[in-house]
Amino acid sequence: MNSATPGTPGTPAMPPDHPSTTASAPAADSFARLPLAATTLANLEQLGYRSMTPIQSAALPLALAGHDLIAQAKTGSGKTAAYALPLLARLDPKRFDTQAMVLCPTRELADQVAGEIRRLARGEGNVKVLSLCGGTPIRGQTASLEHGAHVVVGTPGRIMDHLERGSLKVDSLNALVLDEADRMLDMGFFDDIATVARKCPTKRQTLLFSATYPEGIARLSRQFMREPKEVKLLAAHAATKIRQRFYEVRETERLHAVSLLLNHYRPVSTLAFCNTKQQCRDLVDVLRGQGFNVLELHGDLEQRDRDQVLIQFANRSCSVLVATDLAARGLDITQLEAVINVDIAQDPEVHIHRIGRTGRADEEGWALSLASLEEMPRVARIEELQRMECKWHPLASLTPASAQPLLPPMITLQILGGRKEKIRPGDVLGALTGEAGFPAAQVGKINVTEFSTYVAVDRDIGRKVASRLSAGRIKGKSVKARLME
Ligand code: ADP
Ligand code: MG
């Protein structure tokens, strides 16, 4: 297997004959260094993509040159564009056959990815991107496929279904992407992925993206990839934006210590990781008992309930999201002030991945870990991996920063009616700021799902908004709205 692991994110050196003396020479991490169409570059500019992220500057030159690729980087590092730009670059929108396919572990991620690819494709003419996942009637999808889709994004099970029915044809496929490959393996999709990959033309590019590198990845790559290049960006982030602190706890004080941390640091949004489902449940009980606004993300949730939990957390209506690693994998939540490791992860790479979720972009974040004596060997392995000693602080140093309970700044209203009723975010914002007279500054994120719309508003006006909405109209129809508490 070839290896092109970049030492530093700065990558590739300017070729010597490059006219680097002219003022217009693009910076090392500029998209303009890549063989991309001018319209694509202009679109990237429009999207606010000023420079490549480290995984993009490592992966894009290789992928655009046609190599198979195994790329590993943490969540939120910009992996989608790292594979979407190469597959869009090769796409011919004038042909109507399916030219690229992206496999994702869940519907949620597939929808996210499809949306991102559509945005990135704006510079390429009329590119159709179709999402194919379970939980949606297959007939509607078959009809959409008949109209042609240049790129399909979906879960392995549903894609396999369409291949077997013959509703999806992949004879002209150029590129197959396995996104969140580690999570797909965790979810038992190995055989489905294998079936799908075998149906694809052998002469194709295969790109595999993953946040971690478990055993099965090597197996997948041996079977389905051709001399893949490897790009790994691991652990390098830990030192920069993330302030890590460790606290030693006795087993009996662990859950209570979480509330001490919350009251001391008072983060708006915290993701709390436990190693087991039972620990998640116990923590939720303890925190609720103390008046915290907390939700749990676990594998047994129906898709709709999972959506509701994620929406409330991402729109800042919930202070703490409690989850196991499995349940939290692949979440893309941008503003996260803190990650709490309620238990120390078994695997040091998992620890690095957990804490990489805080301190995104220009924000600083806290990574707070509770460790018992029995967990010290795990902490030692973390120190080895991050090549840095952990900083310990005594539990006794944690004092409440305020006498007020920690409350989320927003509250979510659920409006019955969604995409099916053709409701768009603008309709809801219009209803709130128009007749109802609420200032736009008090309205937060608006999420429209198939049957429901969720809108976050300042916590103090939640009740008023709920009663105004229920008395008023959206798109000329009266609606039902309720506060989610
Ligand atoms: P990952 O798949 O690694 O978790 P995503 O591809 O979902 O990460 O990207 C995370 C966020 O960063 C997205 O909101 C995306 O639009 C944004 N993003 C990606 N690349 C860039 C870039 N070069 N400049 C600015 N924002 C970017
Ligand atoms: Mg991703």
Image (cartoon, rainbow, N blue to C red):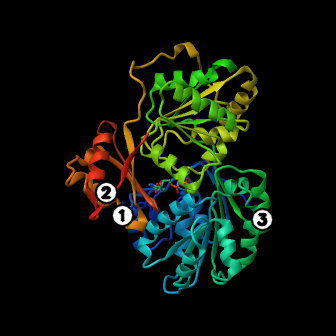
Label 1: which residue? 423
**Other-residue count near label 2 (Cα within 10 Å), few / some / many at <14 / 14–19 / ≥20:** many
Q: Mark 3, mark 1: which one is toward the viewer? A: 1
Callouts 1 and 2 close, C-beta under 8 Å: yes
Give the mark, 3 or 1, whose residue is nearer the N terminus: 3
Residue appearing at x 65%, y 43% in the figure: 325
Q: Is residue 77 left or right of residue 47?
A: right
What secondary structure is marked by label 1?
loop
Up the image or down, 284 lies above or below 421; here it is: above
Q: Amino acid at mark 3?
A: Asp
Q: Nearer the viewer, residue 26 or 439?
A: 439
On the image, the x and y values in percent for residue 478 come to 30, 59
Q: Quadrant of the C terminus?
A: top left
Give the mark, 2 or 3, whose residue is nearer the N terminus: 3
Q: Amino acid at mark 1?
A: Ile
Callouts 2 and 3 close, C-beta under 8 Å: no
Q: Mark 2, mark 3: which one is toward the viewer? A: 2
